[in-house]
Amino acid sequence: MSSQVNRTSKNKGWKIVCINCGKEAKTELPDSKCKYCGDLLEVSISGKVGRKALFDGRGPGIWRFVAGLPFQSGTAPVSLGEGGTPLVRLENIRKGLRLDNLYAKNDGQNPTGSFKDRGMTVAVTRAKALGAKALICASTGNTAASLAAYGAKAGVKTVVVVPKSGVASGKLGQAFSYGARVFGVGGSFDDALRLVLDLVKSDDGFYLMNSLNPFRIEGQKVAAFEIYEQLGAVPDFVVLPVGNAGNISAIWKGFKELRANGITSSYPKMIGVQAEGAAPLAAAFASGRGLVPLKDPHTVASAIKIGNPVSWKKALRAIEESGGRALTVSDDEIMRAKGELSSQEGLLVEAASAAPFAALRKLKLSGNSKVICVATGNGLKDLADHRADMAIETVDNARSIIASLGHG
Ligand SMILES: Cc1ncc(COP(=O)(O)O)c(C=O)c1O
Ligand SMILES: [Zn+2]
């Protein structure tokens, strides 16, 4: 069938392997799982990449780091200029937290407003090379927005499946604007992903773009390269929100590759933060007995309202190998941290992205630790939380502000 994706390809310098049985996947299955044992796959890059080759590259966004990616240099990427986001020192909130070196990696400044763009540029470039005709994902909103944009740029059809309710209207608006077909399911993200996996298995024309796709992870790992370069050191802690658990796995992979290539000599501790009502990974970390999926996840942070994270094994490995931990924060703590970030640092993030900042109070890190919180998504996508505060005043009141400040 001409609509099928050519899933068999010879690759130079890298292969796709199973994280469990270690066997190579010479042919990719539609659901991006191992043909032999059904576990997750990852890209394994052979040979060493030196500091100069990795950091002195050129190209748009994350493609500067093509030497560390599963592509030949000279690949024409489907790029919107993703990556290269600022590492911002949080001068104001760090004092209250007694942390001298607290930074936000502001991934909300990516082209569609979230870290998803890092992985999407890579996965869409790969999908295009394989001749995929339709790209599909399940999403809590940001993946849908990102896939839709990169699909538009590539000229490939996109299909996104989202929970019928609870997705931020800004994210949905993006998906529609970029031209995706948008489908809604009752239930949560987990139900949407189940449907998508059924669809890709029954129709070989679809190409799966969730973070089960190991090429998504390859793009997202570049955040580690950038953090190391911007900080001029390996941080002590990287703290980030965990939903489907792809990003924590990806950033850890990036730090592991830096060390395997002899560029660095230490690792950060990876700290995964979940909302109390949607915390299966934190529970698995605490119990040491593997993941028990949660049927009815709930939290205000809709991006991480996920009960059955597909990359939980990779994420637990990242946390355990690095000596980190997983913990939870309440919705109130998330919203308080979100307010502090915007009103004290000028950093407007969506609720999920405030979770790592909320966790700082609980982590009790030593004052001189180098701490990076990943601000995963832009708050402009989801302003519903602020409606109550948006009472516009009359102009007369403006004068009283100066009066109330006094003239010293
Ligand atoms: C803003 C934001 N933060 C965090 C996450 C969680 O990332 P992951 O699913 O890779 O754990 C998501 C996922 O949708 C997100 O949109
Ligand atoms: Zn396997």
Image: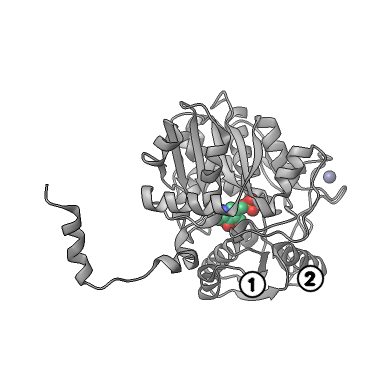
Helix, strand or loop status at disc 1? loop
Give percent across and percent down for residue 96: 42, 37
Query: Which of the two discs, 1 and 2, labels the residue nearer the N terminus?
Result: 1
Helix or strand or loop: what does disc 2 sit on? Answer: loop
Rendered image quadrant of residue 8: bottom right
Residue underneath mark 2: 203
Q: Residues within 10 Å of mark 1 (few under 14, many from 20)?
A: some
Q: Residue furthest top?
A: 265
Q: Quadrant of residue 393?
A: bottom left
Up/down of 107 relative to 197, above or below: above
* In the image, the residue with mark 2 has its CB under 8 Å from the nearest atom of ligand 2: no
Return the x and y of residue 350 as percentages of the image width and height. 50, 57
Which residue is tagged 1?
A: 165
Please tell me which residue is depicted at 71% across the width and 53% down the height of the picture: 212
Question: Callout 2 environment at 10 Å: few (<14), some (14 to 19), or many (20+)?
Answer: few
Split into 4 quadrants, where in the image is the N terminus? bottom right
- The residue type indicated by label 1 comes to Ser
